[in-house]
Image (cartoon, helix red, strand yellow):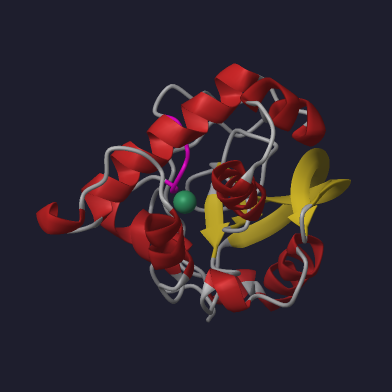
């Protein structure tokens, strides 16, 4: 798996849609300059095919669904194949990072019961609570001990959204994507370690 940096700035200031971020990250990807995450060989990638991937994102406070074409590359040195995934996406899931953070923020501001709220976003109640617990656990791992939280909060969401290039920074520090569940398993055709190029395009 190749996790390409797509969110360069603070999440809260993003003007582009996830689709636009995805398209931009793919267009910036230069396989001739990349090192293979498995064997380290540089410039040995060959695009072999693509597959469709469902993406659920948010535009403002609305759910937006789209289908992406994910490009796959093969390293001609070691033979491993890698899917190119910009960091707007969370590996092994359909929900974009922006979607989950938007839902959590709206959850804090909701004026209706949780069941009704989840119906409006077309998610299961169990999914919402899974995201809350993931957010709390991973946020607490990210921040200092004095800033730890017991439940999702506006301040914590603002802190994450205000950190430049947060998705890539979190990935580099912990080796897995923010809000990716530890139990998530590969559903695509490329079950490779969750790593990204250290020398990827900026
Ligand atoms: Zn390789």
- Figure quadrant of residue 116: top right
From the top left corner, tell me how far across and down residue 177 is, in percent: 44, 47
Magenta-tinted stretch: 177-181
From the top left corner, tell me how far across and down residue 3 is, in percent: 53, 56
Judged from this view, the residue extending furthest toward the left is 145
At 39% from the left edge and 28% from the top edge, which residue is drawn?
Answer: 182
At 50% from the left edge and 34% from the top edge, which residue is drawn?
Answer: 131
99 lies above or below 144: above
- Figure quadrant of residue 41: bottom left
Magenta includes 101? no
Magenta includes 180? yes
Judged from this view, the residue extending furthest toward the front is 111
Does the rendering let one see residue 197? no
At 57% from the left edge and 51% from the top edge, which residue is drawn?
Answer: 105
Considering the whole magenta stretch, tell me its main secondary structure.
loop
- In this picture, residue 76 sits left or right of residue 95: left
109 lies above or below 163: above
From the top left corner, tell me how far across and down residue 56 is, in percent: 77, 43
- In this picture, residue 11 sits left or right of residue 28: left
């Amino acid at each position: 798996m190749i996790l390409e940096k797509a969110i360069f700035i603070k999440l809260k200031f993003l003007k582009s849609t996830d689709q636009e971020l995805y398209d931009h990250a793919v267009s910036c990807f230069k396989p001739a300059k990349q090192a293979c995450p498995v064997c380290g060989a540089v410039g040995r990638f060959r695009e072999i095919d693509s597959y469709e991937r469902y993406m659920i994102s948010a535009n403002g406070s609305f759910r937006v669904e789209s289908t992406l074409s994910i490009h796959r590359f093969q390293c001609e040195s070691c033979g491993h194949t890698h899917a190119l995934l910009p960091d707007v996406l969370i590996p092994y899931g359909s929900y974009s990072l922006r979607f989950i953070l938007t839902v959590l923020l709206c959850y804090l501001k909701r004026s209706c019961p949780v069941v009704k709220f989840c119906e409006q976003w077309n998610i299961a109640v169990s999914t919402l609570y899974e995201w809350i617990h993931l957010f709390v656990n991973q946020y607490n791992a990210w921040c200092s001990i004095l800033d730890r939280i017991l439940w999702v909060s506006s301040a914590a969401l603002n802190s994450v959204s205000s950190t430049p290039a947060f998705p890539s920074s979190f990935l580099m520090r912990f080796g897995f994507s923010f809000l990716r569940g530890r139990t998530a398993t590969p559903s695509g055709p490329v079950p490779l370690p969750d790593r990204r190029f250290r020398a990827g395009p900026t």
